[in-house]
Amino acid sequence: MKKRIMASLLAAACVLSVASCGGNNAATTTTTAAPAANNDTAAATTTEAAPAANNDATTEAPATEAPATDAAPAADEGDTFNIYAWNEEFKGFFEKYQPGYDAATQTLDGVKVVWTINPSADLVYQTKLDEALMANADAAPADKVDLFLAEADYILKYTDSDFTMDISQLGLSQVDTEYQYTVDAASDSNGKIKGVSFQCCPSGLIYRRSIAKAVLGTDDPDEVQAQLDSWEKYDAVAAKAKEQGYYMHAAYAETYRVFSNNATGPWVSGGTLSIPSVVEDWTNQAKTYYDNGYILDTLPGIWDDGKNAEMFNTGKTMCFFGPAWYFNFCMGNAQDPDNGCYGDWAVIKGPQAHFWGGTWMLAATGTDNPTLVAKVMKAFTEDESVCEQLIKNEGQFTNNKNVNQKFAEDPNYGNAFLGGQNDVAVFAGMTDSIVWQNATIYDQACNEGYQDCIKGYIDGSIDKDTALQNFYSKIREQYPSVTTP
């Protein structure tokens, strides 16, 4: 049954990859050799996944013996360690900090490491990964997927399938230094833990200090927080910022995750789709902000160049929203040595606590390198020396409470990008509010589809009912069994 679900999800993913409200085309991938280490870019490298083999929905995924995780790889394990990801972020961390990894030979404990990296846009990553997982049982040893990454919006698709392993099969168990929501997110419907995350992702309001000083009269994080600790205050400051020639935020969807991750119910319940009330609240805010000129009138998306350009020193936007991975991995323009504004930033909780994303490591059923899979999972969650390097060198907020607390309490620690602010202390103060709830396999399609389709209503090119009908049509196309209004 679970494999039938997985097969249907693969088919649905292929449909969505060519269907969108904006008419985007599916991304094209090319075959390349395994990429060399490059920690200076977020650009995705693409390699063709193994073609799908027999998609027989009745075949059970094979079990894998639990390894001795502290020993060297067993003699009967594979000589190629295949890792699937959607960008270079974790690859860079792995190549710098994974114990036993030899960069010169690109091997881990003598086993060749091969990365298959496809972009997440238009579901290219998931489509290629799904094809490889479907073929994994019959794949040649050198082609077997061993470890792959997933993020919050679609992790349930993989944890609630037979294509991922219970970590107990790897000789692992939950450790008390992990944040509970990261464990809940990686657990299947029966409570079996299927993966681990190297990140905890409380998300905050990242503001430009110089603009805050001009608009609010201060750039001190505590004082700025006091003026932005509710949506009512945030709206009032937006009006004030406009009067002084600034934008409150740039992208029309900038605050979407703050609202959606505080939903009290799921997108789909009992097979019926309903729009969460908080998403309606966000829609009203986005429309008001566009009509009042509080955001860019070009309505860029959260990853678009128009928004990213606002991170340069010439930008007029005060607020951005995101977790530690966002300002360390996605705010390159702000860090540009010639045109950026490094150090002119700070992070606070903002109007409402929330989290955004995260990266989970999952073991593919059929892996012939379970010992190495376990070793990598342990390194990035339990090895305090590795976690410390992620904070000191990469600006991450890790999934190890002890390490995070150590930095949060260190009076000498500060993030230079944030003007010396101790961002770990800020994020540590948000973690208690993060709860994994209301998640469904439909979340990515609903979250992304709604934002895409409602944009026409926000800019006035179509009425709201038309925008909603476009959204419902998109969901029905991907998930025919879901009932829509």
Image (cartoon, grey):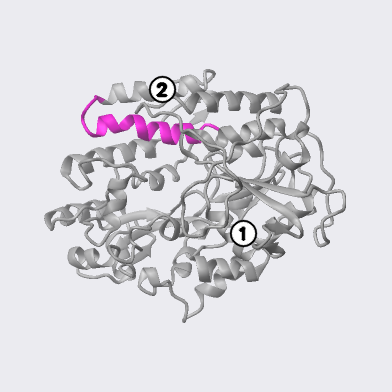
Secondary structure mostly taken by the magenta-highlighted segment of the chain: helix
The image quadrant that residue 178 belongs to is: bottom right
**Residue that protrudes farthest toward the bottom in the picture:** 412
Residue 133 against residue 116 in the figure, above or below: above
Is 460 inside the magenta-drawn segment?
A: yes
Q: Would residue 428 be found to the left or right of residue 165 on screen? A: left
Is residue 399 visible from the viewing direction of this image? no
Q: Position of residue 250 (x, y in %)?
A: 27, 49
Element type where label 1 sits in the image: helix
Pick the front one: 464 or 122: 122
Pick the front one: 43 or 347: 43
Is residue 428 visible from the viewing direction of this image? yes
Kind of residue at disc 1: Phe
Mark found first going from the N terminus, 1 or 2? 1
Q: Disc number at residue 94? A: 1
The residue that disc 2 covers is: 472
Q: Position of residue 37 (x, y in %)?
A: 57, 57
Residue 446 against residue 310 in the figure, above or below: above
Q: Position of residue 347 (x, y in %)?
A: 37, 64
Pick the front one: 331 or 401: 331
Element type where label 2 sits in the image: helix
Q: Would residue 377 be found to the left or right of residue 390 on screen? A: right
Residue depicted at 30% across the width and 57% down the height: 311
> Where does the magenta region start and end?
441-463
Residue depicted at 33% across the width and 58% down the height: 333
**Residue that protrudes farthest toward the left in the picture:** 243
Residue depicted at 71% across the width and 55% down the height: 174
Q: How many marks?
A: 2
